[in-house]
Image (cartoon, rainbow, N blue to C red):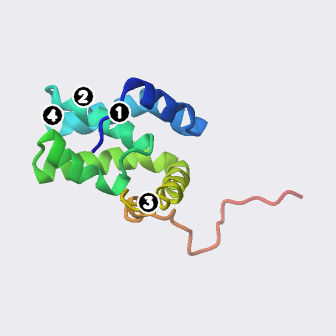
Amino acid sequence: MPQYTQEQFNQIFEKLPDELQEAIFSVETADAIYNARLSQGVTDERGNRVAELTGQVLMGILLPEDFQKTLEKEVGLKKDAAANIARDITRFVFFPVKESLRQLHNITEAANSAAPQVKKAAPAAAAFAQEAPSPATPKKEDTYRESFE
């Protein structure tokens, strides 16, 4: 993964949709990352790297579907720990902003298609396909409803 300067991060951040900017600095995001890594016993400096990589997904630098493998490779987590952390962060951080991420990665894909040496970004939808169960719909009439008459 290429290295970015603070100035480059700032430029990328400024171009993000408001929803993603808010997600990067939200208390909910920080709590979700902390709880995910704590549940797997990642209480050392590797936890900071987990947070950095989460931010890179939210900024469009790292694809959501590459998140788990990157946790394994760059953070040095075992496969099951990386899978559990990635699952929790996807559920509580990425899924709530999935539409913004999807749009961001589609924009990235279009921009990268002009440069053949750059790997094109796949749509972010694949990372969310298994994480988002559809809401249950009642199979029978709802007897609780009252008429407006």
Residue 94 horizontal/vertical position (percent): 42, 47
Residue 54 sits in quarter: top left
Residue 17 seen by the camera = yes
Placement of the C terminus among the 4 image quadrants: bottom right
Which residue lies under the disc numbered 4? 42
Badge 2 marks a residue whose secondary structure is helix
Which residue lies under the disc numbered 2? 48
Residues packed near mark 2 inside 10 Å, few (<14), some (14 to 19) or many (20 plus): some
Mark 1 or 3 closer to N-term? 1
The answer to whether mark 4 and mark 2 are in CB contact below 8 A is no
Badge 3 marks a residue whose secondary structure is loop
Residue 53 sits in quarter: top left
Residue 13 horizontal/vertical position (percent): 50, 32
Mark 4 or 2 closer to N-term? 4
Q: CA distance from mark 2 to mark 3?
A: 27 Å
Mark 2 or 3 closer to N-term? 2
